Image (spheres, rainbow, N blue to C red):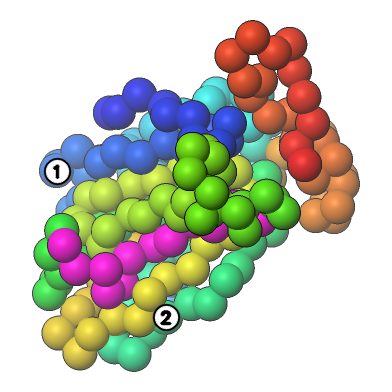
Amino acid sequence: MTQIRSLWTTPIWTGTIPPDAVPAAQAEPDGQPRTVPPAIRDLEQLAARTIVRTAPEELRWEHRTECWSHPHHVGMRYADGDVRFFVILTAHGTTTSDPDGALYLHDPRPAALNISLPGLPWGRPRVLPALTRAAIIMPGWLGWSILPLTPAQQIQVWTGTGYHTRTATTSDDRRRNFRPHPSPGESGGVAG
């Protein structure tokens, strides 16, 4: 697995799941997985330790599997949990240079609109191409969207949303409880 990388002082993990984990994580017809394979449990633990910075047992998870095909797309959304992950189980009809069907992360902070200013670290979207076994873990407050799929594409995805068992359930309370990673040289800070 890839090491965590801090973008815009926001913890985001990208990597891949092992090849042998894909058959074990196939989608159920109703979208509700009957079992959660070990590779997905590993992502839950990684999300707890690196994104939410809590013990894995302090997160309650909801899982869903979906099959996306043309003309599927998703406009700007936000997770209703503290942390979210996407795993592309299978992707047919996509290439590394193909933006169709890709997951885009969007920084909701006001300064993100200043992306035309050179040198600023925030505001640039993070892209997860729709490639088999690709995975991303992100804080729930980051915005995300999915570009429209082409007629040749079919993507099977596993999503997980983690809810901290010790925080309030409203999104405003979750934003107040978010503990961002400090920038180098800082002792801490508040998301803003």
Residue at 53 percent across and 26 percent down: it is 50
Q: Nearer the viewer, residue 140 or 44?
A: 140
Q: Point out residue 183 in the picture as x, y percentages from the top left corner.
A: 62, 20
Q: Which mark is residue 34?
A: none
- Mark 2–mark 1 Cα distance, whole angstroms, equals 26 Å
- Asked if residue 153 is positioned above or below residue 79 in the image, the reply reads below
Q: Point out residue 11 in the picture as x, y percentages from the top left corner.
A: 53, 33
* Placement of the N terminus among the 4 image quadrants: top left
Residue topped by disc 1:
19
Q: Which mark is residue 73?
A: 2
Name the chief secondary structure element in magenta. Answer: loop
Q: Point out residue 152 in the picture as x, y percentages from the top left corner.
A: 15, 84
Residue at 75 percent across and 18 percent down: it is 188
Per the rendered image, the range of residues in magenta is: 97-108
- Asked if residue 88 is positioned above or below residue 151 in the image, the reply reads above
**Side of 48 where 145 appears, left or right:** left
